[in-house]
Image (cartoon, grey):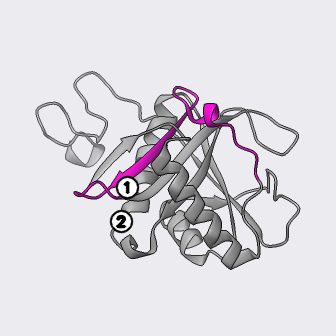
Amino acid sequence: MQIVAVPYDHPDAVALNGRVQIEYAERYGEGDHTVMDPLQFAPPRGLYLLAYDADGTPLATGGWRAMDATPEGHLAGDAELKRMYVVPEARGRGLARRILRELEESARTAGRTRMVLETGTRQPEAIGLYLSEGYEPTEKFGYYRFEPESRCFAKPLRVVAQTRGQREDGRREDGRREDAAAR
C-alpha cells in the first residue's frame, strides 16, 4: 500500500470523488454540494492524499483544507477534513485510519490547531471511525450546518512538546522512557 500526495484535481482523485458522490446520492438522495477549489488542498494550506494498492489502483482518498473564522462557523486555525473515502472492496483494511492520521500530522505541521469535519447520520461507519480517533461532537459549521442529519466533529491538533534529548513518542534518544514513574 502506498499513500501519496496529489492535487485535488488529479485524475485518480476525480475518479474516486465521483464514486463518493454516487455513494452520497445513494445514502442521502443527492451528492455533496460543498464548494471546493482544488487550490484549497495545495500545501501548505491543505493536502490531498490517495492510497494505491501494489498494482497502482487507487483505493482511498482524503484531504484537508485550511479554514479560518468564517460566517459558516469555522474557527481560526481550523483544518477541515474533506472527501475521506475508501472504495467498498478495500474497506476494513485500515486505509481511512492511515490517511486520517497522515492528514492530522500534516495539518499539525502546517500550524493548524483543530481538525474539523462534517458527516451525516447515514454514515455510521464514518462517525464510528472519527469517535474512535478522538473526535468529539462540536457546533455545526459549513454548508450543511442547518441540516438535521448533519453531524460535525472536532479534534484538537496538539503539538507535543519535546525536551532536549527526547523524541515525540516520549522516549529519550537513548531509547529509555522518560516519565515520572520511571524516576
Residue in the picture at 56% in, 69% down: 126
- At mark 2, the secondary structure is loop
**Point 65% across, 54% down: residue:** 117
Choose between 176 and 92: the one closer to the eye: 92
104 on left or right of 36: left
The quarter of the displayed image where residue 113 is located? top right
Q: Which residue is mark 1?
A: 98
Mark 1 Cα shell of 10 Å, populated few (<14), some (14-19), many (≥20): few
Instruction: Look at the image and say whether residue 88 sits in the magenta stretch.
Output: no
Q: Residue furthest left?
A: 174
CB atoms of marks 1 and 2 within 8 Å: yes
Q: In the picture provided, is 139 more to the left or to the right than 130?
A: right
Residue sitting at x 75%, y 38%: 75
The segment highlighted magenta reads 34-57
Across and down, in percent, residue 123 comes to: 62, 74
Q: In the image as oriented, which residue stretches furthest toward the top?
A: 164
Classify residue 131 as left or right of residue 97.
right
Q: CA distance from mark 1 to mark 2?
A: 6 Å
Where residue 115 appears, as percent x and y from the top left, is 59, 46
Can residue 32 be seen in the rendering of this structure?
A: yes
Which residue is painted at 58% across and 55% down in the image? Answer: 83
Q: Is residue 176 above or below residue 98?
A: above
Quadrant of the image occupied by residue 92: bottom left
Q: Residue 135: x, y in percent?
A: 57, 59
From the viewer's perspective, is residue 84 above or below residue 94?
above
Q: Nearer the viewer, residue 57 or 1?
A: 57
Quarter of the image with the C terminus is top left
Q: Is residue 56 magenta?
A: yes
- Residue tagged by mark 2? 94
Report the front residue among 86 and 13: 13
The residue type indicated by label 1 comes to: Arg
Give percent across and percent down for residue 1.
Answer: 26, 56
